[in-house]
Image (spheres, coloured by chain):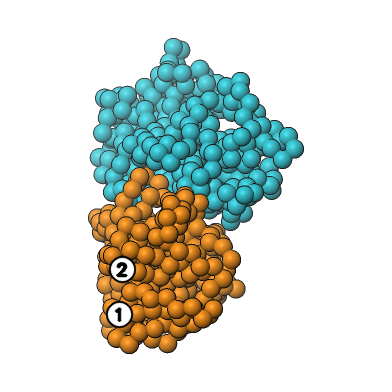
Chain colours: A orange, B cyan
Amino acid sequence: MIDVAIVGSGVAGLAAGLYAGRYELKTELFSDFFGGATASAWTIENYPGFESIDGYDLIMKMRSQVEKIGGKIVEEKVEKIEKRGETFVLTAGGNENEAKTIIFAQGAARRKLGLPKEEEFSKGKGVHYCTTCDGPLYKGKTIAIIGGGDAAIKGANLAVQFAEKIYIIEVTDHLNPEPVNMARLQPFIDNGKVEVMLKATVKEILGEERVTGLKLDNGKELAIDGLFVEVGAIPDVELAKNLGVELDEKGYIKVDNNMSTNVPGVYAAGDTTNFFGGFKQIVTAAAMGSVAATSAFRHIPR
Amino acid sequence: MIDVAIVGSGVAGLAAGLYAGRYELKTELFSDFFGGATASAWTIENYPGFESIDGYDLIMKMRSQVEKIGGKIVEEKVEKIEKRGETFVLTAGGNENEAKTIIFAQGAARRKLGLPKEEEFSKGKGVHYCTTCDGPLYKGKTIAIIGGGDAAIKGANLAVQFAEKIYIIEVTDHLNPEPVNMARLQPFIDNGKVEVMLKATVKEILGEERVTGLKLDNGKELAIDGLFVEVGAIPDVELAKNLGVELDEKGYIKVDNNMSTNVPGVYAAGDTTNFFGGFKQIVTAAAMGSVAATSAFRHIPR
């Protein structure tokens, strides 16, 4: 019998695993891909304590900390979670695992444009969802980044080191990144390496074998080698919904200040919640994980 | 004109300073003692990313991160904060500083027993409020720790390495630390080095020049060399109260999910709030600081 089954192995899940382990609870983390969004986040400079660290290095530090305290990481997709009496039964990799409590910490999936060929070309044929991860593949090439938020501009700041030309295509009339990131990009806008197109949307992805261009809603066509979609994320809440967990009006798992959901024994932490409004950071995910584990600990009878 | 004036320079204040700096806000942190509770917290093993780190080392990493991004640390006690029109005027070290926003992150002060001689003996004469800080002074001696919470038991776990004999005196009928810390202490209770007295309170601190013993409410007298009071903390909220900031029922600064207080432009983070209930950790303080700075950033007109 697992005390705390954590769905997800990103920062929120690992912080929950660390605290649950310190509470001497039998703790297992389940996820098909280890490390969550942070693992592919490139350079992190806003997690207090590390002036600058690669996301993958940070997540590996957190992993070893969890494993040292006794937490187990199971790299299997969770297929189903059911309630049987007072116990939860979590199916992963074809095996059933009984657990006293569940913490959902599975993050949020990248939002897509929903255009024809997008899915097909996303398999190594020029469509990407993480500029900081895949930008370096386009050395000397032309790319387009869709979106005007912080992820888009941070991605552009990385891409200028590799790409020859970068288009930023944003549906609203302004970019909305952290000012420090905008300031870094500005010289490249000024010298023309980065071209910003506002009030513009992609109508069609062009190309036969792979991406070769974009057609915009204003009729303009751009020749590109790679397309980077940075238009936000949607939380993966199916497992939670099937357990009867309530969502908020934006579709995220609804939690109170203790990270409790409406289902006793079920908690959530990190990007799968909308706890601090739209503000989703490594440090906030870590804090939520620590709180969720503490609530799980208090829930388990001793 | 300062954009964000932060009162306090512990983890919450430094995390706020980091984020405010990244938002390119003119940021200054004010406090008479740098580093907050973490600076004297000895070994930290529950901050995600660091398997084990000295509290002082962690706080110095956070300090250099803040200073690198342009945050300024002013080691002066804040004497007064007033509102003048849309601006706050913060007086520290006799100087007036104008600020657009205020973040209270001044932590909480240690709770005292309120006994005669306690204050007098706390000046280097055997009364202490942080076992992990001052325990090592009592090599080969006998000490008493008052309190049964996690701070008390963590302190005892350190003190067993130095002291000859340790009494733990707790007013309730049970100890209430994290199980992992209790498990570490158990062998020393079993071998008699640590003696736990439940349902007991200190009636009198004995000694002329310095602490020599305790008299308990059951009439028993203990000969000791040092007294460690670990009975919690009270938030330092006078500056906030004078600004009209609302407190919660326990006397902590009341904040919403954005770390906003009831006064526009005034935020709070860390142990001076009770945001996650009684749960006050380095990682939760850091998250709150990041959120408070983000709210301040959104509040300032651009």
Vertical order, B39 against A109 (above or below): above
Percent x, y for residue A281? 45, 57
Up the image or down, B30 lies above or below A190; here it is above
* Residue B49 visible, this angle: yes
Q: Quadrant of residue B135?
A: top left
- Left or right: A221 with respect to A59? right
Which element is circle 2 on? loop
Q: Quadrant of residue A64?
A: bottom left
| Residue type at numbered disc 1 | Lys
Quadrant of the image containing the N terminus of chain B: top right
Q: For residue A141, which numbered disc appears in the image?
A: 2
Q: Does any portion of residue A98 appear in the rendered image?
A: no
Measured as percent of width and height from the top left, residue A23 is found at 36, 56
Of all chains, the one bearing label 1 is A
Q: Which mark is residue A125?
A: 1
Quick check: B201 left or right of A13? right
Q: Amino acid at mark 2?
A: Lys
Front position in the image: A154 or A301: A154
Q: Position of residue A149 (x, y in %)?
A: 49, 63
Query: Nearer the N terminus, badge 1 or badge 2?
Result: 1
